């Protein structure tokens, strides 16, 4: 058997597909993976999970906080988390805003935790409550589909507006099956405006995909993540149980018209050649194959099964924020002459604090290169 070449080191588990890199990210996830249930509960308590939604709670998001307080907080920490959700049929037992409430309540926990550390991360309202969708979701009642160009342009201009307000470190956190549109938005934003900053997108489920693989452990998920299934419903029961009605849960089994092993499920747990989004036609559209709006077994769901994945993503997001904050505190960026083709001298007025003397708005930027439109 071939070994691993070079300095790469890994932390193994009893499951052959669950392996963590021996670095800060991998060690953190391994700790959560191995933690006893009491430690998982302690982590969730630190982040005050579960809690009521803070979308309407003053002082929690940029848009529900007085402007003076937004500026004060940004001067301490100019990282912003941008949640991306959708409106989608998740079966008769679950709410169609499940993706939006799931991702917002995750980042709300991170905000509460970083506030205790003294450098509260900023949260932006979701720019997408109605998301883009793959072809097989077309026509489902309860699912509202935005065209791809609407999704991409909405995200681009959300990023530009937040950059213009001094939030030059942006993490867009996705909770829905339109990730390729987010990739397009990030790359197009950078090509179109060539602004310096730190820009990331993440599918939160994929960041902790190891925690959606069934393992031989009390309280483990019994099936892997697909759609409106055991995984999503368990997280919903943990985070917003009053929006879930388990008496209406119906289990389904998806169909495939070609042999398996080629296309992965929602969080790519099996390391197959294709992501689920890289093909159509080898399985039915949702209305014809699973009109219930479910692919999987939500009847198996419990709030406890959602705890470990949520603890893992909370810790991972915190690590991401802390690593950025430590290297690049508010107002600092990676070397500007190396992360943009624009002249650093030209950018000086645009990089000043918004509203300060000599500041120029990003909407006054000179057009550069072939990608601006």
Image (cartoon, rainbow, N blue to C red):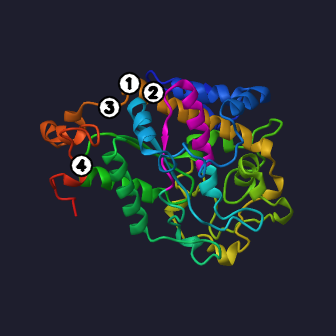
Q: Nearer the viewer, residue 254 or 333?
A: 333
Q: At numbered mark 3, what does the secondary structure look like: helix, strand or loop?
A: loop
Query: Would residue 157 appear left or right of 287 to someone viewing this image?
Result: left
Category of crowding for the residue at label 4, using alpha-carbon neighbours closer than 10 angstroms: few (below 14), some (14–19), many (at least 20): some
Of badges 4 and 1, the one in the foreground is 4
Q: Along the polypeptide, which appears first: circle 4 or circle 1?
A: 1
Q: Residue at x 38, y 32 (%)?
A: 75
Disc marking residue 323: 2
Tags 1 and 2 touching, CB below 8 Å: yes
Q: Which is in the foreground here, disc 3 or disc 2?
A: 3
- Provide the secondary structure element on which disc 1 rests: helix
Mark sitting on residue 327: 1
Q: Which residues are magenta?
A: 104-126
Residue 331, numbered label: 3
Judging depth in this view, the residue of 267 and 151 nearest the camera is 151
Give how far apart the Cα atoms at labels 4 and 3 are: 16 Å
Could you say where residue 169 lies in the image, as x and y percent from the top left? Answer: 38, 39
Pointer 3 local density, CA inside 10 Å: few below 14, some 14–19, many at least 20: some
Q: Position of residue 244 (x, y in %)?
A: 77, 58
Residue 361 circle label: 4
The outermost residue toward the right is 247
Left or right: 31 in relation to 130: right
């Amino acid at each position: 058997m071939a070994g691993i070449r070079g300095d790469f080191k890994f932390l193994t588990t009893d499951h052959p597909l669950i392996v963590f890199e021996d670095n800060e990210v991998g060690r953190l996830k391994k700790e959560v993976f191995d933690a006893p249930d009491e430690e998982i509960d302690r982590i969730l308590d630190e982040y005050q999970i579960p809690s009521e939604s803070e979308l309407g709670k003053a002082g929690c998001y940029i848009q529900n906080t007085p402007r003076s307080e937004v500026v004060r907080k940004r001067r301490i920490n100019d990282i912003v988390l941008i949640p991306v959700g959708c409106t989608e049929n998740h079966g008769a037992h679950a709410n169609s805003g499940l993706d939006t409430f799931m991702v917002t309540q995750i980042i709300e926990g991170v905000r509460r935790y970083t506030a205790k550390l003294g450098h509260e991360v900023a949260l932006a309202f979701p720019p997408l409550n109605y998301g883009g969708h793959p072809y097989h979701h077309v026509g489902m009642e309860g699912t509202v589909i935005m065209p791809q160009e609407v999704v991409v342009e909405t995200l681009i201009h959300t990023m530009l507006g937040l950059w213009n307000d001094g939030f030059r470190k942006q993490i867009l956190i996705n909770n829905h099956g339109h990730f390729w549109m987010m990739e397009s938005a990030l790359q197009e934003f950078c090509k179109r405006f060539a602004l310096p900053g730190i820009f990331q997108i993440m599918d939160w489920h994929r960041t902790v995909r190891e925690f959606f693989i069934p393992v031989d452990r009390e309280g483990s998920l019994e099936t892997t993540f697909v759609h409106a299934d055991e995984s999503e419903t368990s997280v919903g029961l943990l985070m917003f149980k009053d929006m879930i009605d388990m008496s209406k849960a119906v289990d389904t089994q998806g169909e495939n018209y070609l042999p398996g092993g080629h296309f992965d499920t929602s969080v790519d747990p099996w390391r197959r050649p294709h992501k689920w989004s890289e093909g159509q036609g080898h399985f039915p559209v949702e209305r014809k194959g699973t009109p219930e709006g479910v692919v999987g077994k939500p009847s198996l769901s419990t709030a406890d099964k959602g705890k470990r994945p949520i603890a893992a993503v909370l810790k991972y997001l915190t690590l991401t924020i802390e690593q950025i904050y430590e290297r690049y505190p508010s107002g600092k960026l990676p070397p500007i002459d190396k992360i943009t083709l624009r002249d650093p001298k030209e950018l000086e007025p645009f990089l000043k604090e918004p509203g300060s003397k000599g500041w120029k708005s990003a909407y006054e930027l000179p057009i550069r290169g072939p990608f601006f439109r």
